Amino acid sequence: MSDIKRVVLAYSGGLDTSVILKWLQDEYKCEVVTFTADLGQGEELEPARAKALKAGIKPEHIFIDDLREEFVRDFVFPMFRANTVYEGEYLLGTSIARPLIAKRLIEIAKMTGADTISHGATGKGNDQVRFELGAYALMPGVKIIAPWREWDLLSREKLMAYAEAAGIEVDMKHKKGGAPYSMDANLLHISYEGRHLEDPKAEAEESMWRWTVSPEAAPDAPEYLDLEFEKGDLVAINGERMKAHELLAKLNQLGGKHGIGRLDLVENRYVGMKSRGCYETPGGTILLKAHRGIESITLDREVAHLKDDLMPRYASLVYNGYWWAPERVALQTLIDHTQASVSGFVRVKLYKGSVSVVARDSVNTLFDQTIATFDDDGGAYNQADAGGFIKLNALRMRIAARKAGK
């Protein structure tokens, strides 16, 4: 007999989590609480409520939460203050959503008196690590059930058979062999994995992409956006101030229109394998470029370089599930301290899959035109000073060269 009495399940209402819900009831004989997060994935979430009710979940134990603003304001924006990129390309759209889901799972567990959480992440992926590290950081004594590490339903055929035997409604797409890709979407990105993409030699089909047109099909005329930042965060587009999640949604729409933000990547997963994924991150791609644009005139050189040195470490912490770890919090404190002066406007040009910064200004600018000019600077900069600077920096190399007999 299981000692687990109540478990909070991260529940989408799809095939996998519907089977997990029934499996938990059968295998653990426990009461299940369902949690469905609206992170801006663009899907209707209310059907999950109906499915949970049909599975015998009490109405008061069904949580469908709109987390869009919290997601962008408290997770996406702090990550972009660090200009975070994993392995040179990936903007961490899936990774950054997991600590928020873990946080809400634990909050609901405490609200409902549950001592256990459960998720549908497989034993091959990164999400199991991210969910569980977050959960343990926020509720050290929590119990975790990861069905994919316990059951023998390790194929779609077995899942289908279990669902049909249990009377679980199965979408037509699964009856016809399933969706062509495993997809995850939120306000920052949409990802595609599996099926056709499991062969790294195969080019992604054009029909796969959902948020962006191909660069070739993008408008022939460029579009310019004026983006306003305050302390490192985007606050307005073309003079219109909006909530954080509305700003990102707007950038997604504009970037997708111009074919911006597509990525085909083979990444190194935390569990040790290489995995291929395709991603669409139009808004994030624009935001990253613009943020670096405003930092270019407001950050001290060495502070900017320090941030660039620390960014790969920060990116690895996010990717590997350490959002709630003390070292990530410490890094965030330093990063946020550097953003006090990062306010102003950036003009970006969107064109045929590319985004470029074409203008920037700030009341905190460190750009001094009287010093940088190629014209007569009126004595603002003494060019003769450079000679001594160069000689001092060359001293150790000159000594080494003499020792080598050069």
Image (cartoon, helix red, strand yellow):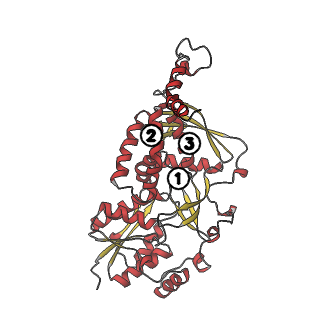
On the question of residue 242 being in view, the answer is no
The residue wearing badge 3 is 289
Depth check, mark 1 against mark 2: the one in front is 2
Task: In the displayed orientation, state which residue is furthest to the top.
Answer: 378
User: Which amino acid type is shown beneath numbered disc 3?
Assistant: Lys
Q: Is residue 35 rendered to the left or right of residue 276?
A: left
Residue 159 sits above or below residue 336 on the image: below
- The amino acid on which the numbered mark 2 sits, given as a three-letter code, is Leu
In the rendered image, residue 249, in percent from the top left (x then y), is placed at: 53, 50
Nearer-the-camera pick, 130 or 76? 130
Q: Choose mark 2 or mark 3, whichever is in front.
A: 2
Circle 2 crowding by C-alpha within 10 Å: few under 14, some 14–19, many from 20:
few
Amino acid type shown at disc 1: Leu
**Mark 2 and mark 1 in contact (Cβ < 8 Å)?**
no
Q: As displayed, is residue 172 above or below residue 329?
A: below
Q: Residues within 10 Å of mark 1 (few under 14, many from 20)?
A: many
Q: Which residue is mark 2?
A: 306
Chain-order first, disc 2 or disc 3: 3
SS category of the residue bearing label 1: loop
Q: Which residue position is annotated with label 1?
A: 91
Task: Tell whether label 3 touches label 2 (CB within 8 Å).
Answer: no
In the depicted view, which residue is nearer to us: 105 or 96? Answer: 96
Question: x%, y% of residue 208?
Answer: 65, 63
Establish if 272 lies above or below 248. below
- Of residue 85 and residue 342, the one placed in the foreground of this image is 85
